[in-house]
Image: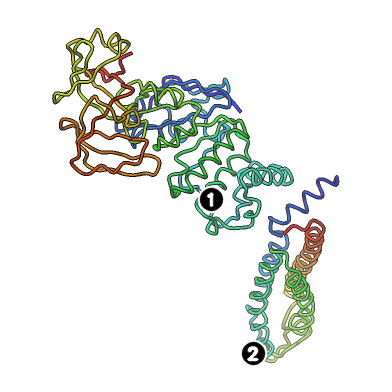
């Protein structure tokens, strides 16, 4: 296993479109880093640059202390798992997993031992004589992972490996990947657009948008202290509610007339914004039934343990995640409180800290 | 080879094909094709225009079919196909004493000139083709039989599939 260092990585395509801007991160040995962001944000391009499948326009890529920026993919000692599995249909599971080592003219007995060990880890021992078409999506993805494991590469790269699986299988395979990471202690770089995957798998998350890194941090850091409006809106499900608000002494005057009181700490934080407009962010799970602002209910979604209440507050849409079973009717008015608030600069969209 | 390596080699057979035997079968097919192309390109009067050559054509077609089936069978460690491959190999040897030997010994009259139907060079060539074809089939069959027995014993020993 190895550490990984991406220094000022840029990707500019031939048509002058820049997909990645100054990507910087130092990944420690055995760390699982998840690149997350919407489609087209440059996360897969970054991964492909690490793999060597895309040329690096500028910047330096260091794997285990060695500059591999110009090195061809075969010499980088990395293994990649693709979204579409990329298995050989005419080969059995065993042959698929052994193939890369066969190409390296490895001793057949050594190959066998590595394949059997990987199959044991992935629970594929009974499937080794089957062809990929006889396997489920989850099993195919495990074969793809097995093919990567047998090579014992320095770095594992995952490019949206769970996107082709149904929701149930995705959860199960996600847990398997997590166990695999714990068991192998391998350095992994994982790309996904699914924030649930990012939050559950990552040691650290890199949140990207439009080719720029928005924030790097632990899942809790990104959830609890988002760096800007984008990260705040992207991480968390349902997404955070945003309102324009004007700081007025110890209060926030919301667009539309409602006001929200601030704690002393919050008032101190916003003291330099007095009289200015900011963006107030409130996570749906931080809204409770209280006595601060009135919400007109549009509809309720009961999820068993929780209820999502969608409504409007002075004309602004708002979603609350209440920890009880509620059956509010359309048009009914409820009063809620904001337990935890996030404040963002209206112009820069950065968090006010 | 150490016991561990030997055991690993046996265990590996559960997931790998017997490609040696199947490749030998393909080589046998190739040399049989060379054999009949050589025979059927002979143009010596009407010597070959009889029922024997018709039977030979049919046998060659059957040989191609069954040897191909055997190649697939031995590839998957089938004892039956291994034995069948050995039989096919033995028949290739027998075939030397049919058309090649008879044609080599036959002399016909063409325009009142005695001509040997198959000269020494052609005879040697076709016999070599048939012997190689036979040897490949016999070797493929024997290897298949040995490997299949080893694999069956290993599976019985370990209780694995």
Callout 1 secondary element: helix
Q: Quadrant of residue A207?
A: top left
Tell me whether the residue at label 1 lies in contact with that at label 2, contact meaning CB atoms closer than 8 angstroms.
no
The quarter of the rendered structure image containing the N terminus of chain A is top right
Q: Is residue A264 depicted above or below A104 in this figure?
A: above
Q: Nearer the viewer, residue A222 or B3?
A: A222
Q: Position of residue A335 (x, y in %)?
A: 23, 30
Q: Position of residue A56 (x, y in %)?
A: 42, 27
Q: Which residue is mark 1?
A: A140
The quarter of the rendered structure image containing the C terminus of chain A is top left
Q: Nearer the viewer, residue B153 or B42?
A: B153
Furthest-left residue in view?
A: A256
Q: Is residue A327 left or right of residue A197?
A: left
Q: Is residue A281 left or right of residue A76?
A: left
> For the residues marked 1 and 2, what is the alpha-carbon distance in whole angstroms?
59 Å
Q: Is residue B55 depicted above or below B132 in this figure?
A: below
What number is the disc on residue B49? Answer: 2
Q: Residue at x 55, y 24 (%)?
A: A63
């Amino acid at each position: 296993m190895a550490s990984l260092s991406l220094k000022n990585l840029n990707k500019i395509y031939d048509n002058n479109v820049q997909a990645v801007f100054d990507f910087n991160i130092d990944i420690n040995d055995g760390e699982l880093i998840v690149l997350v962001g919407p489609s087209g944000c440059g996360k897969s391009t970054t991964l492909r640059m690490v793999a060597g499948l895309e040329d690096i326009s500028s910047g330096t890529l260091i794997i285990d202390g060695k500059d591999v920026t110009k090195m061809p993919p075969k010499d980088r000692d990395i293994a990649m798992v693709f979204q579409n599995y990329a298995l050989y249909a005419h080969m059995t599971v065993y042959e698929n997993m052994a193939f890369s080592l066969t190409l390296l003219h490895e001793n057949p007995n050594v190959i066998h031992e590595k394949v059997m060990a990987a199959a044991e880890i992935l629970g594929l021992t009974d499937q080794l004589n089957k062809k990929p078409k006889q396997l489920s999506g989850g099993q195919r993805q495990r074969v793809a992972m097995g093919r990567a494991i047998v090579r014992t590469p320095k770095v594992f790269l995952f490019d949206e490996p769970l996107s082709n699986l149904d929701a149930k299988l995705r959860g199960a395979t996600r847990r398997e990947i997590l166990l695999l990471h714990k068991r192998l202690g391998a350095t992994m770089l994982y790309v996904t657009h699914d924030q649930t995957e990012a939050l559950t798998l990552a040691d650290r998350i890199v949140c990207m948008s439009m080719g720029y890194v928005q924030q790097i941090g632990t899942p809790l850091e990104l959830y609890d202290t988002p760096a800007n409006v984008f990260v705040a809106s992207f991480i968390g499900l349902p997404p955070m509610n945003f309102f324009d608000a004007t700081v007025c002494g110890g209060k926030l005057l919301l667009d539309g007339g409602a006001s929200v009181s601030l704690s002393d700490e919050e008032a101190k934080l916003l003291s330099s914004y007095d009289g200015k407009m900011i963006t107030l962010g409130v996570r749906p799970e931080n809204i409770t039934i209280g006595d601060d602002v009135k919400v007109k209910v549009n509809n309720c979604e009961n999820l068993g343990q929780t209820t999502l209440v969608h409504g409007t507050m002075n004309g602004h849409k708002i979603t609350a995640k209440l920890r009880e079973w509620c059956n509010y009717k359309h048009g009914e008015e409820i009063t809620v409180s904001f337990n935890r608030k996030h404040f963002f600069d209206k112009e820069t969209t950065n968090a006010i800290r | 080879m150490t016991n561990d390596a030997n055991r690993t080699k046996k265990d590996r057979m559960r997931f790998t094909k017997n490609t040696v035997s199947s490749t030998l079968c393909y080589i046998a097919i190739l040399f049989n094709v060379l054999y009949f192309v050589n025979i059927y390109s002979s143009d010596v009067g009407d010597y070959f225009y009889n029922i024997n050559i018709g039977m030979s054509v049919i046998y060659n077609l059957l040989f191609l079919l069954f040897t191909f089936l055997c190649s697939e069978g031995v590839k998957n460690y089938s004892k039956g196909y291994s034995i069948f491959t050995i039989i096919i190999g033995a028949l290739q040897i027998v075939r030397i004493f049919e058309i090649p030997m008879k044609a080599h010994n036959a002399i016909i009259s063409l325009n009142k000139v005695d001509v040997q139907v198959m000269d020494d060079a052609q005879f040697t060539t076709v016999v070599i083709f048939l012997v190689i074809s036979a040897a490949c089939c016999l070797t493929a069959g024997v290897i298949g039989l040995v490997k299949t027995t080893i694999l069956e014993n290993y599976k019985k020993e370990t209780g694995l599939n």
